[in-house]
Image (spheres, rainbow, N blue to C red):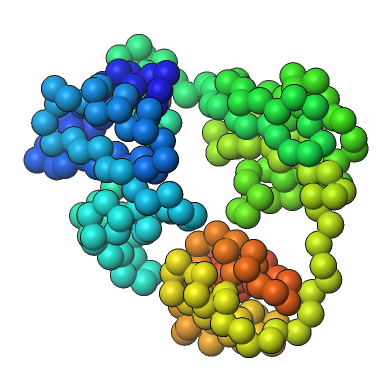
Amino acid sequence: MLENSDEIAEGLNILLHMFPNTKIYVGIENNKNDAIDAMNKAVSGINNIEIVALKTKYPQGAEKQLIYAATKREVPSGKLPAHVGCIVQNIATVHAIRNAVVLGKPLTERVITVTGGSIKTPKNLRVKLGTSLKELVQACDGFIVEPAKIISGGPLMGTALFSLDIPAIKGSSGVLCLSQKEWDIAPESNCIRCGKCIDACPMFLIPSKLNSMVLKGDYDSFEANHGVDCIECGCCTFVCPAKRHLTQTCREGKRRVLSKKKK
């Protein structure tokens, strides 16, 4: 948004032409004042676009949380943003729309963050899709120490990788290479019923209860207790003093429920 604010404003204007009589909210966390100022200046001559300064908290960027923060509309359980008259677009998608319409340029690259305690020179890289993740690490001067864990994405919602010999795709956002010190975690123990996971859940679920249902194989109860609404943000696992694998079991529960529905 700092480097391409005018181009993003063009993309937003294109969206207004695609969806007449709508209003666009651009949500930016309130600790990014430079980005807020740049975007306010870029859209100053365009009607029906509002820059919204959002409270800096995780997971503010999740679809349902972003809609509520900007419009106060609540997306019902099991429903999509369209059910409350909203469409959510990533700012990079808006920029890609502008390039496609104005320049006739398809999406061929994206910015990927390469970081972690094992990386010698962490960087944000503009990468052609299809580039090997190994080449991205080499562009950051390689490893200081051999990583104990490599994650595609962020530390809370990313997925573990067994190898760097895979390509960057349009959904790639980061490569996190953790050292052994960063990766060391305490072993999982029994739930102590503290309720911290309930307080942390942005979807107002009961992660400890869902965890128990999945471990018992009771996927019907998991679905009945809105387990499929879990956004897998990792907040429950992060705050759990017993180090329960709450997000992982919710992910497995969702996979089983959705797989059952496809049969």
Q: Could you say which quadrant of the image residue 101 lies in?
A: top left
Taking depth in this image into account, of 229 and 199 the one nearest to the observer is 199
Image location (x, y in percent) of residue 116? 74, 38
Task: Tell me which residue sits at (66%, 25%) in the image.
Answer: 123
Give the position of the N terminus as an image quadrant: top left
From the viewer's perspective, is 30 left or right of 213?
left
Question: Residue placed farthest to the top in the image?
Answer: 103
Q: Is residue 255 above or below residue 195?
A: above
Taking depth in this image into account, of 64 and 241 the one nearest to the observer is 241
Task: Tell me which residue sits at (50%, 70%) in the image.
Answer: 201
Q: Is residue 105 above or below residue 65?
A: above
Taking depth in this image into account, of 187 and 138 the one nearest to the observer is 187
Q: Is residue 207 visible?
A: no
Q: Is residue 92 above or below residue 89?
A: above
From the viewer's perspective, is 248 left or right of 254?
right
Taking depth in this image into account, of 228 and 197 the one nearest to the observer is 197
Task: Tell me which residue sits at (82%, 67%) in the image.
Answer: 186
Image location (x, y in percent) of residue 117? 78, 39
Q: Could you say which quadrant of the image residue 122 lies in?
A: top right
Give the position of the C terminus as an image quadrant: bottom right
Image location (x, y in percent) of residue 176? 71, 40
From the viewer's perspective, is 74 left or right of 91?
left
Task: Tell me which residue sits at (79%, 44%) in the image.
Answer: 178
